[in-house]
Amino acid sequence: MSACSLICLIGFMGCGKSTVGRLLAERLGCAFLDLDSLVEERRGKSILEIFRCEGEEAFRGYETDALNSLTGRGRLVLAAGGGAAVRPENSRFFLENSFTIHLQVSFPEALARTRFDPLRPLLRLPQESLKALYDSRLPEYRRLGLTVATDGRSLEQVVEEIVRLLRARGQLREDLGQVHP
Ligand code: S3P
């Protein structure tokens, strides 16, 4: 497999995409981008406001547009929103343009990590609906990316496993970014 310049982290809310992504980018000496932040920047509104004023469908469209703007930028670690990977036009993007890692989190752990977060609109769903969403997304996350478990592991352990995977898959070519020892 030839080295991809884009490394995308996917997975359910609370799996640690943004935190792990930032550390991984630091380790690889490359840029980091959070897809939600990019959408917010492009729209001039928070995710919560977009959901509230324009609805989820509009948000999904902005998310797809933001994702498609990301090719040809040099090596980049991207934290994608938890729903980005499950839209068919986006899953094609992940398969064709990125080396994709699924950060696996169990449902109880995802709840524990996000329960005080007022900014994620979908966390307002009743718990059974959120669990159904989790269950429905898991197979797609697994199909699109290599799975790395996060429950009970430190951020550093997760980053190290990703680096190992990147190395094993020939994704650490020097022209794309240097791993700091
Ligand atoms: C969403 C996850 C959020 C954000 C939006 C919708 C989802 O991102 O994109 O609130 O559908 O799971 P995080 O996964 O970074 O929380």
Image (cartoon, rainbow, N blue to C red):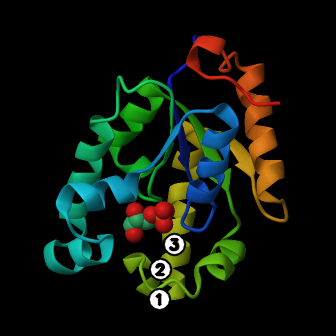
Considering the numbered disc 3 on the image, is that residue within a helix, a strand or a loop? helix
Disc with the residue nearer the chain's start (3 vs 1): 1
**Callout 2 touching callout 1 (CB < 8 Å):** yes
User: Crowding near pointer 1: few (<14 within 10 Å), some, many (20+)?
Assistant: few
Q: Can you name the residue that lies furthest to the left here? A: 54
Which mark's residue is nearer the viewer, 3 or 1?
1
The residue labelled by disc 2 is 129
The residue labelled by disc 1 is 126
Considering the numbered disc 2 on the image, is that residue within a helix, a strand or a loop? helix
**CA gap, disc 2 and disc 1:** 5 Å
Q: Three-letter amino acid code at disc 1?
A: Pro
Whether the residue under disc 3 has CB within 8 Å of ligand 1? no
The answer to which of 25 and 35 lies nearer the viewer is 25
| Ligand 1 quadrant in view | bottom left
**CA gap, disc 3 and disc 1:** 10 Å
The residue lying at 43 percent from left, 26 percent from top is 97
Considering the numbered disc 1 on the image, is that residue within a helix, a strand or a loop? loop
Counting from the top left corner in percent of width and height, residue 112 is at 68, 81
**Quadrant of residue 55 in the image?**
bottom left
The residue labelled by disc 3 is 132
The residue lying at 26 percent from left, 58 percent from top is 41
Q: Is residue 66 visible?
A: yes
Q: Three-letter amino acid code at disc 3?
A: Ala
Q: Is residue 31 above or below residue 73?
A: below
User: Crowding near pointer 3: few (<14 within 10 Å), some, many (20+)?
Assistant: few
> Which quadrant of the rendered structure holds the N terminus?
top right
Q: Is residue 1 visible?
A: no
Counting from the top left corner in percent of width and height, residue 181 is at 83, 30
In the image, taking residue 158 as reference, residue 44 lies left or right, namely left
**Callout 2 touching callout 3 (CB < 8 Å):** yes
